Amino acid sequence: MPSSDRHARAVHAAIEGFGGTLAVARALAAGGRHIDLSGLDREAAALCAAVMALEQEAARALRPALEALLRQLDGLNTELAQG
């Protein structure tokens, strides 16, 4: 397997992992817990850098996963605004 394929798969796994992190953050926010967003901010920045390092076709293939992540971020934002 070419290293570019491995990198794209690793980025996809990171997107899924970040989605799990956001789900936990949202549950904590729903429970009235304080969330340190700086960690999420750093993780999102690293994820964006990883996507930008991919070849255009590989990055484009991740668009659905990234759009799902954006919806999760919007949900967290809504939860925090209501808190």
Image (tube, rainbow, N blue to C red):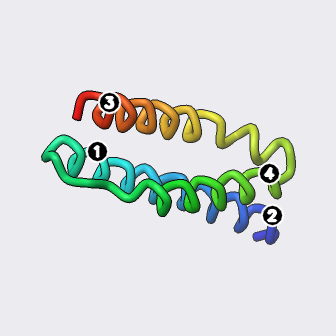
Q: Please, which residue is most extreme toward the left here?
A: 31
The reply to whether discs 1 and 2 touch (Cβ–Cβ < 8 Å) is no
**Residue under label 2:** 4
Q: Of marks 4 and 2, which one's residue comes earlier in the chain?
A: 2
**Residue under label 4:** 52
| C-alpha distance separating marks 2 and 3 | 39 Å
**Residue under label 3:** 81
Q: Of marks 1 and 2, which one's residue comes earlier in the chain?
A: 2
| Vertical comparison of 19 with 61: above or below | below
Single out the mark in the foreground, 1 or 4. Answer: 1
Question: What crowding class fits label 4: few (fewer than 14 Cα within 10 Å), some (14-19), or many (20 or more)?
Answer: few
Depth check: give the residue in front, 18 or 16. Answer: 18
Q: Secondary structure at mark 1?
A: helix
**Residue under label 1:** 26
Single out the mark in the foreground, 4 or 3. Answer: 3
Q: Residue at x 18, y 41 (%)?
A: 30
- In the rendered structure, which amino acid carries the disc numbered 1? Arg
Q: Position of residue 18 (x, y in %)?
A: 47, 55
Determine the image quadrant of residue 26: top left
Q: Please, which residue is most extreme toward the right here?
A: 55
